[in-house]
């Protein structure tokens, strides 16, 4: 199994910044994609940003130019630097990864428990 643990959420004023971090641990053979999703109350969980094993990135239109995803392959971590935060960014942010636990094992999706981000004055 692979465990994902997020950190860095909290309360921030509009226009402020936050940095989310996610650390993967457990029986990791190889990690492929890592991503951040978010889910606001009463809404579906949506992709925020994704980074592949070769560091290609993709962002939701709503966060382009404000959020940056990055990862450290050696440490199995993925970060989300968020700036220019607006109230609409308020949500629970979830770390996501696809990984193998062995060279003959299937690629499996894993989720973190989520971290709350609240943008409010």
Image (tube, rainbow, N blue to C red):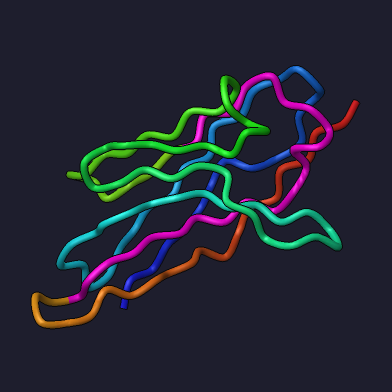
| Camera-side residue of 118 and 34 | 34
Give the residue at the far front of this rendering: 61
| Camera-side residue of 72 and 44 | 44
Give the residue at the far right of this rendering: 121
Where is residue 84? Give x, y as percent: 69, 19
Residue 117 found in image quarter: top right
Residue at 23% x, 47% y: name it. 53
Residue at 52% x, 49% y: name it. 36
Q: Which span of residues is magenta-colored?
A: 80-101
Q: Does residue 87 lie above or below 101 as drawn?
A: above
Q: Does residue 23 lie above or below 73 as drawn?
A: below
Number of disc labels:
0
Where is residue 93? Give x, y as percent: 62, 51
Q: Does residue 69 lie above or below 51 as drawn?
A: above
Where is residue 74? Give x, y as percent: 17, 44
Residue 99 found in image quarter: bottom left
Quadrant location of the C terminus in the rendered image: top right
Quadrant location of the N terminus in the rendered image: bottom left
Judged left or right of residue 104, residue 59 is: right
Residue at 84% x, 58% y: name it. 41
Residue at 45% x, 50% y: name it. 35
């Amino acid at each position: 199994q692979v465990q994902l643990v997020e950190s860095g959420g909290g309360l921030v004023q509009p226009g402020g910044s936050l940095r989310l971090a996610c650390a993967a641990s457990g029986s990791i053979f190889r990690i492929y994609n890592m991503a951040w999703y978010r889910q606001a109350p009463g809404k579906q969980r949506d992709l925020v940003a994704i980074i592949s094993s070769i560091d290609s990135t993709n962002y939701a239109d709503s966060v382009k130019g404000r959020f940056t995803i990055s990862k450290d392959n050696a440490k199995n971590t993925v970060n989300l630097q968020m700036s220019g935060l607006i109230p609409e960014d308020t949500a629970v942010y979830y770390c996501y990864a696809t990984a193998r636990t062995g060279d003959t094992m299937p690629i499996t999706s894993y989720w973190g428990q989520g971290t709350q981000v609240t943008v409010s004055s």
